[in-house]
Amino acid sequence: MNWYPTRLPPQAGRQVLVTGANAGLGFFTSARLARAGAHVTLSGRSPERLAAAVAAIRTRMPRASVDTLVIDTASLESVRAGADWLLDRAPLDAVVLNAGMVHTPSERRESVDGNELVLATNVLGHFALLADVVPHLARGARVVSVGSLSTRLSSFRVDDLQLTRSYDSWRAYAQSKIAATSLGFELDRRLRRAATDAAEAVGAASVTPRVHSVVAHPGYAISGRTPRVPGVNQPPTADRFADALQAAWAQGKHRGAEAIVHAVTADDVEGGQFWGPQWMVKGAPRLATPTRTSRDARIGARVWAFAEDAVGRTFDVGGRS
């Protein structure tokens, strides 16, 4: 199988951060951007797994411009330390918010900060990271939140995001992805308002936000349909056989990464858009339709206020155009 299904526009000179980059969608997103010439910072919890991912990239691309950053998105202290490291470097041109728990615990657990663990890992850590780095992003930068088909398969209890009343592993994952998608669209709305306010303040006509917030989902992307990469993706033979039976409606994670990479690189991408595979579960990238819940501005504002309270800080994009 080919890691790189489609050609990308040249990315030389661009600085990109990918969270959860040591495996799966994050790894293939990082590898493809690096091959196109971007400098990619691969972020994850494990230094050893990040080193393996970098080694895998450099095996194919010895001159790839990559480095690593250890961030555990379930820990606000770890997120803040990672943000401080990023703020000492060149402004980022793109941030891909991919890190997350897919295999969620069967019983409710809490992060070191007292937040429900799946929500903390998949949503709150990224929210806190953006609160620090958005002012440091380059003009025209893109924030790409990784969504999921699970947002279509679950209700959303905006009044119980911590799942203190009722927890199950599926709801924990699905609610976290709905919340992440909702925040991605809410960030775009706030960036647009901030750009409009800044333009009016100086009498300018342009209201284009300096940062574009986009959501992309990978369809149904599974490990057994993904190229074998030593130290990164090594599903056992039995899993490959089982996943091959799903070929009609599934794709590898290298293919699932296409929508994410498109959201980072393509000229036809704008803030507030939702990209996914052509046939929903697989296929080339195309504009998709998000759920009404994730698009609802009132819900987005509530999730934003909740996230600010959960991470203990205000995330104000006002005045940054």
Image: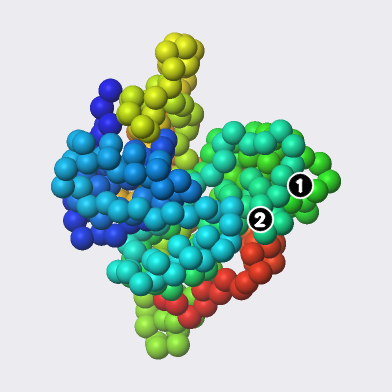
Query: Label 2: which residue?
Result: 112
Q: Find numbered disc 1 in the image and state the secondary structure of the residue it sits on.
A: loop
Q: CA distance from mark 1 to mark 2?
A: 16 Å
Nearer the observer, 184 or 97 = 97
What residue type is disc 1 on? Leu
**Going 28% across and 36% down the picture, which residue do you hit?**
56
* Residue 158 in the image, given as x and y percentages of width and height: 73, 52
What residue type is disc 2 on? Val
Q: Find numbered disc 2 in the image and state the secondary structure of the residue it sits on.
A: loop
* Residue 28 in the image, given as x and y percentages of width and height: 34, 38
* Residue 297 in the image, given as x and y percentages of width and height: 63, 59
Nearer the observer, 274 or 4 = 4
- Kindly report which numbered mark, 1 or 2, lies closer to the viewer in this rendering: 2
Lower sequence index among marks 1 and 2: 2
Q: Which residue is situated farthest in the left direction here?
A: 63
Q: Is residue 24 left or right of residue 119?
A: left
Q: Which mark is residue 235?
A: none
Nearer the observer, 132 or 273 = 132
Query: Label 1: which residue?
Result: 163
282 versus 199 height, above or below: above
**Going 45% across and 46% down the picture, which residue do you hit?**
46
